[in-house]
Image (cartoon, rainbow, N blue to C red):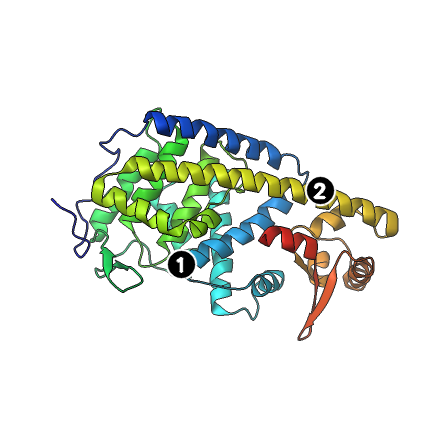
Amino acid sequence: MSFDPRGPYNELPLLPPDKELETKEVLKKAITANKALAELKGAGDLVPNQAVLIQAIGLQEAKLSSEIENIVTTNDELYRAFASEGQKAEHHTKEVLRYNEALWFGYNWLKDKNYPLTTNLFEELFRIIKHSESGVRKIPGTTLANDKGEVIYTPPEGESLLRDKLGNLEKYIYADDFIDPLIKLAVIHYQFEAIHPFTDGNGRTGRILNILYLIEQGLLEIPILYLSRYIIENKTEYYMRLRSVTEDGDWVGLILYMLDAIEHTAIDTKKKILSIRDLVNRDIEIVREKLPKIYSKDLVELLYRQPYCKISILVKAGIAKRQTASIYLKELEDIGLLRAIKMGRDIYYINDDFLNLLTA
């Protein structure tokens, strides 16, 4: 049956694909992508306090992944909202923060609870992202359109059918088929997006699934590889590759795209991690030399969990009580490590070097 973008794609083939995936070109690319990913995994160990990496890099992913879905917030709004735990944030910024919350829910699902990647998890991620109590779609009418408003894809319909296809996806994730996990990642990513199980938030849920799969497979220890920036920079090709699988069965093109995304992102993220490590070490020495009375390694590392800091953050972290925390931040501003801005009643202390590195 030929594919009709205007009708529900209930005939979406089950996994595994009936095409050869591990071509010579794919296997060659998988080697370099795995090498880059292994080096990134090792780089994460170079930063003593990995919470520095997890929180800071994860928040940028939340912003970029949401941006793909035209949910846009500025870095200033995002980091101010995060420092204030979402209080008085704009609607779009709150949605970005919920993406970040969903990412950590998934990470804890794997690491703390040791649960597998299942439809139950996918639904929980969706509910957090969209602040909704619903789950897998029950009603028809979901379509995907291009910039001209033309329908380019209509996903499968019917809750029972969707759950069957998600069940098949679960089985594929854990199938003992000896296929390189990075190759499987591309297949899993396509299938989830093609099933399109929710009324909204499928792209963001699917991108969280990407990182969770890498962690579940032991290819990463902490969530530090995010493909959203690469997708934004190569957005036209991304959607073309997805459509090519649907319309022509071109799995190899999508797999090569995803492997390239993993390799480039791993290399760039490794560089960023090493630069963060160097900044942390630099500031440790500066504070130790210029402010020995207030110096502590925990204080400096706290400045690298997020680029916007407040007095309450130091208090909550147990660094100092409120009055002393205020003095600490003012002294850090005086030696040029932080820049203070006042927004309403709140004073934010910005780590500009860190902010510039994260957003470059």
* Residue 354 visible to the viewer: yes
Q: Measuring 56% from the left and 35% from the top, which residue is drawn there?
A: 40
Query: Which residue was labeled with disc 1?
Result: 69
Instruction: Tell me the kind of residue under disc 2.
Output: Asp
Q: Position of residue 135 (x, y in %)?
A: 33, 55
Q: Position of residue 161 (x, y in %)?
A: 20, 47
Which badge, 2 or 1, comes first in the chain's sequence? Answer: 1
Q: Position of residue 162 (x, y in %)?
A: 24, 48
142 displayed left or right of 59? left
For the residue carrying disc 1, how many other residues have a C-alpha within 10 Å: few (<14), some (14-19), or many (20+)?
few
Query: Which residue was labeled with disc 2?
Result: 278
Check the picture and name the quadrant holding the N terminus: top left
Secondary element type, mark 1 = loop
Instruction: Look at the picture and state if 128 lies above or below 46.
Output: below
Q: Position of residue 9 (x, y in %)?
A: 19, 50
Query: Alpha-carbon distance for marks 2 and 1?
Result: 34 Å
Q: Measuring 41% from the left and 33% from the top, which residue is drawn there?
A: 182
Secondary element type, mark 2 = helix
Between 114 and 103, the one nearer to me in the picture: 103
